[in-house]
Image: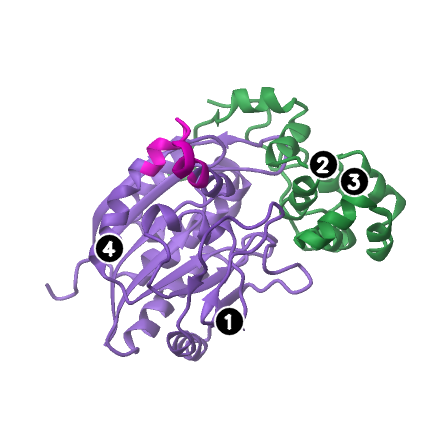
């Protein structure tokens, strides 16, 4: 069993999170993780601009957030677990992020999960 | 001398926690009922084990730590371990307890064995622990826990071999504590991937193969490169390497008391419970 890309460890199939990605995504991740605080979530929903400024987000990073471009945020170095805090704040979930990366809508994604594959690590049989 | 009276590996996931709350309030979703039912024997086993302490090897998901300071290995030494707010607000659960005396003993003994852990006197725990605990124990949990957080989010990750050594160090550290019964748990999702277009992949063949080899084939599992686990089981299945610490904390010979496996939706949910077979018997 498999699906197209089901063995791929490369973006956008898989984002293996590295140190350099962590450096690239520093501002995005700090901003996203500030939303663990309910006070910050309320402030963001009322007016995100001061939070963007406080975290010195670049224009393109703000654009990714405003467009809910979850896959773009992952490509820019955002860690899924951080991006998830932005999704939670705006009323979205893991499903929205996954569906965005797979170019499906959320209901389509829910309908095909679990996406069954098979196979064992090389050399293990 | 303290004794490790058993251990288990178990999956965790955010939805596991949310579905518990929904299930207890209004009945379980058909996808999650099997997991709830499947864990009842684990709940009975844990009660019968009568632990005085539960060591839990888990990973934080940027809910306590941030990448400004993300430890490879960290331990919690505190009287309480409150629940982290993961963005949706905390679930209605009582705080888990800790025992600083046990914690400092473990800190001292782990460092003495060259595991230079970061010691946290405040540690908020996320679904890595809070998602499965209510399935296997009545709350509030009276037994203090000793959490060990492992970096499973950002390379470089600790190697599988290192996690096996962590388990051996836990075993030795527990043995030098006073008279106590200790259960060792490791928790990490089985096959799953949550970032990228492979979202939702499920490899039951791999998950069952893995579960079946924990008794006698730890070295074979440890030899599998992290990337191979990520390829066949999804990037986040690398969390399974934490299970090696649990298995290595138990003696070479174990008796499998119970196991169970199901795949509700996004994350392979498995559990494997082991009793030690005492050396020399």
Which of disc 2 and disc 3 is earlier in sequence?
3
Residue at 46% x, 67% y: name it: B80
Packing grade of label 1 (10 A; few <14, some 14-19, many >=20) is: some
User: In the rendered image, which quarter is residue B173 located in?
Assistant: bottom left
Q: Say which colour chain B has.
A: purple
**In contact (CB < 8 Å): disc 3 and disc 1:** no
User: Circle 3 sits on which residue?
Assistant: A65
Residue at 67% x, 59% y: name it: B67
Rounded to the nearest whole Å, what is the CA distance between mark 3 and mark 1? 36 Å
Q: Nearer the viewer, mark 4 or mark 1?
A: 4
Residue A124, given in percent of the width and then of the height, sits at 38, 39
Rounded to the nearest whole Å, what is the CA distance between mark 4 and mark 3? 47 Å
- Disc number placed over residue B117 in the picture, else none: 1
Q: Is residue B237 visible?
A: yes
Q: Nearer the viewer, mark 1 or mark 2?
A: 2
Same chain under badges 4 and 1? The reply is yes
Residue B53, given in percent of the width and then of the height, sits at 32, 66
Q: Say which colour chain A has.
A: green
SS state under label 2: helix
Residue range (magenta): B20-36
Chain bearing tag 3 is A
User: Circle 2 sits on which residue?
Assistant: A70
In the orientation shown, which residue stands out farthest toward the left?
Answer: B281
SS state under label 1: loop
Which of disc 1 and disc 4 is earlier in sequence?
4
**In contact (CB < 8 Å): disc 3 and disc 2:** no
- Disc number placed over residue B47 in the picture, else none: 4
């Amino acid at each position: 069993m498999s699906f197209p890309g089901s063995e791929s460890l490369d973006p956008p199939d898989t984002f293996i999170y590295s140190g350099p990605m962590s450096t690239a995504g520093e501002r995005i991740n700090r901003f996203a993780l500030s939303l663990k605080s309910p006070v910050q979530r309320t402030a963001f929903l009322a007016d995100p601009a001061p939070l963007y400024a406080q975290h010195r987000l670049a224009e393109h990073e703000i654009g990714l957030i405003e467009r809910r471009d979850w896959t773009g945020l992952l490509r820019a170095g955002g860690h899924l677990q951080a991006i998830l805090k932005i999704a939670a704040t705006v009323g979205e979930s893991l499903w929205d992020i996954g569906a965005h990366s797979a170019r499906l809508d959320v209901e389509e994604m829910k309908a095909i999960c679990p996406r069954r594959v098979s196979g064992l690590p090389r050399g293990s049989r | 001398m303290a004794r490790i009276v058993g251990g288990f590996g178990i999956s965790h996931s955010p939805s596991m926690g949310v579905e518990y709350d929904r299930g207890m309030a209004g009945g379980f979703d058909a996808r999650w009922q099997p997991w709830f039912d499947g864990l009842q024997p684990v709940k009975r086993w844990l009660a019968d084990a009568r632990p005085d302490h539960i060591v839990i090897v888990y990973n934080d998901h940027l809910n306590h730590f941030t990448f400004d300071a993300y430890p490879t290995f960290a331990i919690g030494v505190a009287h309480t371990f409150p629940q982290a707010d993961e963005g949706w607000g905390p679930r209605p659960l009582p705080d888990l307890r800790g025992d600083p005396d046990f914690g400092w003993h473990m800190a001292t003994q782990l460092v003495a064995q060259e595991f230079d852990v970061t010691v946290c006197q405040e540690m908020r725990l996320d679904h890595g622990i809070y998602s499965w605990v209510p399935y296997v124990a009545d709350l509030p949990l009276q037994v203090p826990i000793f959490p060990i957080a492992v970096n499973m989010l950002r390379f470089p990750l600790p190697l599988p071999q290192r996690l096996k050594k962590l388990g051996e160090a836990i075993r030795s550290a527990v043995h030098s504590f006073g008279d106590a019964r200790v259960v060792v748990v490791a928790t990490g999702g089985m096959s799953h991937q949550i970032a990228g277009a492979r979202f939702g992949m499920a490899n039951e063949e791999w998950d069952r193969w893995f579960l079946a080899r924990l008794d006698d084939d730890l070295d074979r599992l440890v030899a599998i490169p992290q990337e191979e686990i990520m390829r066949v089981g999804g990037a986040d299945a690398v969390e399974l390497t934490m299970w090696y610490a649990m298995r290595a904390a138990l003696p070479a010979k174990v008796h499998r008391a119970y196991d169970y496996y199901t795949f509700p939706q996004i994350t392979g949910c498995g559990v494997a419970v082991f009793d030690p077979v005492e050396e020399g018997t």
